[in-house]
Amino acid sequence: MNVTAFVIFLAFVVVTLGITTWASRRSSSRSDFYTAGGNITGFQNGLAFSGDFLSAAALLGVAGLYYQAGMDGLIYGLGALIGWPALLFLFADRLRKLGRFTLTDVLSSQLSDPGVRIFASVANLIVLLFYMVSQVVAAGLLVDLLLGIDFTISALLVGALMICYVVFGGMVATTWVQITKAALLIFAAFLLGFLVLLRFDFDIQSIFTMAMDKHPAGEKIMAPGGLVTGTGAAISLGLTLMFGPAGLPHILMRFFTVPNAAEARKSALIAILIIGSFCFLMIIIGFGAIALLSGDPAFLDETGNMVGGGNMVALHLADALGGNLMLGFVSAVAFATILAVVAGITLAAAATISHDIYSTLVKKGAQTEAEELRVSRWAAVGFGVVSIALSLAFQHENVTFLSVFAFAIAASATFPILLLCLFWKGLTGPGAVWGGVAGLLTALILLILGPSIWVSVLGHDTPVFPYQYPTIVAMPTTFVVAFIVSMIGRSQAVPGQAETI
Amino acid sequence: MNDDEADGTRDAIRRGAPLDFAIMGAIGGLYMAFMLACVWAPEWLGSRTAFTGPLSVGLVLGLGLVVIIVFSAIGYDMLRRRQEKDVKRASEPGA
């Protein structure tokens, strides 16, 4: 075990538990619990947004991809940024004006059909659960790799901490944990980038020149390789990365934590600035890793591969640049990163269960605020326990498809319905429900028939559906079905009734 | 509903949508063009002949996209702030 990493991680846990204690005194109402009372500033929320988006994969995974394939790292790195135009230009202002606590509130404010709330709640929970399990499994594996702690203990530790943050601190604690983690992650990336540049006397040209000289692929690392293959796959991946984030409940919920629409827009702008800077830094870090680590026997095994696998590139680079202290710091930041992301997901799930399902659908608003808060806290515990149990069950499986599925449903079912709801006056309740269900089922079926499950999990030779992401088919399906059902509904409505649907 | 509830009608929400969709469409189009170029012309994207330095065409285009997103976001926020100030000024007594 790396003692430095353990000590820094322990410090992070102590600080975040302190934040939770402080936040618990400020989370007395439903509004405090779900949305921090709308008192988070645009700048703070922008940092928290960055924390949500810049996961451990953004640092460790992308650095590994640059090291392995050069330019392909940029294509993947752009994925963290490309979802933001939709969030800023289409949703930020409008969601803040319409929403109160959850995404379902926004849809219900425009479509009074209870079916819309049921569909949105179910879709949200599916997205969140699948995303959560993939994150917890990744966390367990990462901690096992970084700190040498057994997977089961790691998963239980992550689960216990995230439940603690959410149950006691609500959105206030979750937001400040995200801000702390985002600041640490950005500092770590800046420090790594600075140390790489320092090593090359701030001559960027020499980094790329040495990277091309040392990498086995030579100049080919400057061109795209195997990440995007085929026109359909490129379009489907592009649609998923562009519109998936705009359908993720825990991301959209964050727009309700600021006091007004201008602050919501500002928070998206801050997130774009931070994530955009991160994209630049990762190029320096990635190509710096090729230049400094390639051919160095200290970081390679007998077969010439990176010790510990591709995800260890950023950590080995930290070791090469700053020794054990830097390695420990970056390792602890990577773990803190996962911890903060899962807390945000748990809170969004608790809000969906308590506010959208229990309070509005079951109790029809007849419960007290204290009762709803109590249900929220129990929902957070229940969701956390289920997630941990599933992650323990799936720990030996390739769970990549779970996060793929979460993004695909968000881009295919949730995003189109939200977009139509905000911008098309003709959308009806049944149109939204049938469109959303059609998109959800299409995404599910095509995902099962695609390479992620049909080949990787079920062991068939070739997939029935050729693309990893089903968005290229499922998203248009949602739009078309929602349009047709809405048009049929409106044509059958008596004159004057349609406008009130 | 929050404090902006009075504004929360579908018509108010759709206000400014053409500009928003135009910016979104332009950035989305550029991104899709970049993704398709990665499939159709990896050799061209890997070319370094267009530049004197070591950066490839692909890296410069990818970084250019990042810069476009960042600056369009800054410009959009400034524009909306100015519009909001104008609306506020116009609604003040005596305006």
Image (cartoon, coloured by chain):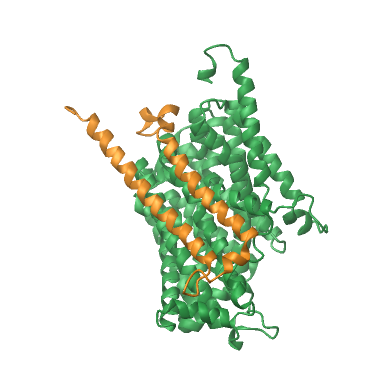
Residue at the spot 48% in from the left edge and 72% down from the top edge: A284
* Up-down relation of residue A60 to residue A365 (above or below): below
Residue A470 visible in the snapshot = yes
- How many numbered tags mark residues here? 0
Residue B6 placed where, x, y %?
36, 28
Residue A3 visible in the snapshot = no
- Nearest the viewer among A465 and A349 is A465
Q: Which image quadrant for residue A255?
A: top left
Residue A90 horizontal side relative to residue A233, left or right: left
Q: Quadrant of the C terminus of chain A?
A: top right
* Up-down relation of residue A431 to residue A13 (above or below): above
Residue A138 placed where, x, y %?
61, 63
* Up-down relation of residue A118 to residue A132 (above or below): above
Q: Quadrant of the N terminus of chain A?
A: bottom right
The tint of chain B in the picture is orange
- Nearest the viewer among B80 and A139 is B80
Residue A167 placed where, x, y %?
49, 50
Residue at the spot 61% in from the left edge and 17% down from the top edge: A491
Which chain has been coloured green in this picture?
A
